[in-house]
Amino acid sequence: MAAKISYADVETGTELPGAEFPVTRATLVQYAGASGDFNPIHWNERFAKAVGLPDVIAHGMFTMAEAVRVVTDWVGDPGAVVEYGVRFTKPVVVPDDDQGAVIEVSAKVGAKLDDQLVRVDLVARSAGQKVLGMSRAVVRLS
């Protein structure tokens, strides 16, 4: 599958459609099973608080993966992402209630590079706080 977005049709500053991703304790247990990361800070409230966290927190790699979905949905081909990196700035705190937490992601084209590549800059927030810093993906367009 090739990228559905054309390099010629994209300018620096082009905004990608944003998205919101809900996260519940059940989501974290499912992710733990898929990833093999069963650290109790991701599912045991008593343990998380005992080590100084405000509550159970989402896995960093889960948060990172949810954020890049904005890019893969926009480009139409996950294989078009040739580079992706973030800094974890704040945890996504997931309370034990029906709502859980929400990861809100926005993104825009930060630069047009050579060889049909663009850099996409992402912003991920939860509970009003930026949870990822320096979140950038490099994507090959058609």
Image (cartoon, grey):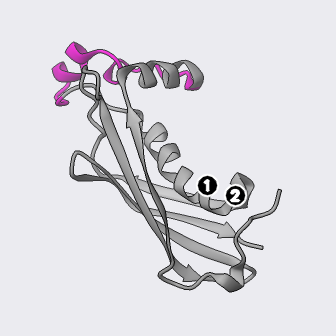
Quarter of the image for the N terminus: give it. bottom right
The verdict on residue 49 being magenta is: yes
The residue sitting at 32% across, 23% down in the picture is 41
Q: Residue at x 51, y 20 (%)?
A: 30
Question: What range is drawn magenta here?
Answer: 35-54
Q: Is residue 94 above or below residue 120?
A: above
Question: Residue 24 sits in which quadrant?
Answer: top left
Which residue does the image show at 54% across and 82% down from the upper left? 111
In which image quadrant can residue 44 be found? top left
The spot of residue 6 in percent (x, y) is: 72, 77
Q: Whole-percent x and y of residue 107?
A: 45, 65
For badge 1, the amino acid type reads Asp
- Which residue is disc 1 drawn over? 73
Disc number for residue 76: 2
Q: Where does residue 68 sit, x and y in percent of width and height? A: 53, 53
User: In the picture, residue 115 is in which quadrant?
Assistant: bottom right
Q: Residue at x 36, y 51 (%)?
A: 104
Which element is circle 2 on?
loop
